[in-house]
Image (tube, rainbow, N blue to C red):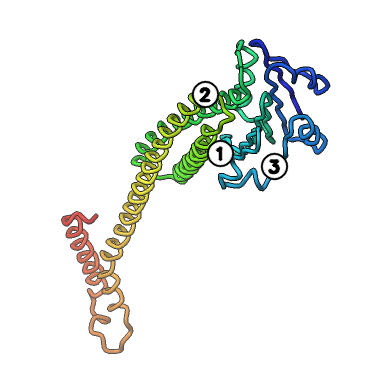
Amino acid sequence: MIKIYALSGGRVEERERSDFEKVSRTGIVWVDVLDPTEEEIGWLREKVGFEMPSKEVMGDIEISSKYMEEGDSISINMSFVIQQKEEIIVEPVFFFIRERFFVTLRYRDIPAIMIFLARLRANRSYVQFAESLFSEILSIEVDRVGDRLEILGRRIRKIWKQIFVEQSQELIKDIAYYDELNITLRESINEKIRVLSHFVKSPLINAQTKRELKVLMDDLSTLLDYTSFYMEKIDSIQNSLLGLITIRQNEAVKVFTVIATIFLPATLIASIFGMNFEFMPELSWKYGYPYSLLLMVGVTLSLLFWVRRKGWL
């Protein structure tokens, strides 16, 4: 599906493909492509010189696959983090910038792009350069990453207090989820910094957009520091949780060990008097049975008193 937005004079209008020749003569043209067909890719190639990247390239981590500059066009492959309940999705988006044309290619709804489009429709924005659209979308995504990290920080602090109250399986799952989210955000931030470091050096980008992107790079560097701090904090929580679980297990083992030790002498006495040798004087003794019982109870109580006095139980 292709949607065309014409930006001119502080207004944005959604136009049909049949109007492309008319709207492309003035202003900025944003072509938003969602899950394109072969026919739509051919139309883009013909109208704006867009070359469709393979899905393998869109998922590659090499900077040569993330940023390409050929002639008067710039191609950028950038991932966006989408958080849905217990699932963390990393969705690639392909940007193509050439003169007054700006193309976004994606395979699902991207919150940052949806927010940008809503703002564009609500506010009169004078956009002079196609790369300014990329800067605005990226600025929204950076704000969203910052918000996620802020929420993540609050939840990490909450879990830090919670582990001393309970050590449940759900708590362990939450810690693993937050750890994965933090790592995913960190990788996304690193990717954006690497791409922007090449983008701001391009002679095809105007000076104003370069200044805006350098500010975004500073913000991303700050967010990267937060992810490092949260990574250390999560490691500390995991180590503390492991220590608390180990202590609980040791306490349980200690209790069972003490109980087994206390009843061991009684078991030994019962075993001795339970032997069936022919010559055992106690077998014919009138008070042998109560004597053995009293002996077992006495030894057990004495050991129990001694263990309690030592503080082992």
Residue 199 x/y as whole percent = 54, 34
Label 1 sits on what residue type?
Glu
Q: Secondary structure at mark 1?
A: loop
Query: 237 above or below 289?
Result: above
Q: Is residue 93 left or right of residue 192?
A: right
In front: mark 1 or mark 2? 2
Mark 1 vs mark 2, CA separation in Å: 41 Å
Crowding at mark 1 (Cα within 10 Å: few <14, some 14-19, many 20+): few
Residue, disc 3: 53
Q: Secondary structure at mark 3?
A: loop
Label 3 sits on what residue type?
Pro
Residue, disc 1: 86
Label 2 sits on what residue type?
Ala
Location of the N terminus by quadrant is top right
Crowding at mark 3 (Cα within 10 Å: few <14, some 14-19, many 20+): few
- Furthest residue to the bottom? 278
Residue 236 x/y as whole percent = 35, 45
Q: Is residue 43 left or right of residue 259?
A: right
- Residue at the location (61% across, 44% down)? 65
Q: Along the polypeptide, which appears first: circle 1 or circle 2?
A: 1
Residue 191 x/y as whole percent = 52, 40
Q: Secondary structure at mark 2?
A: helix
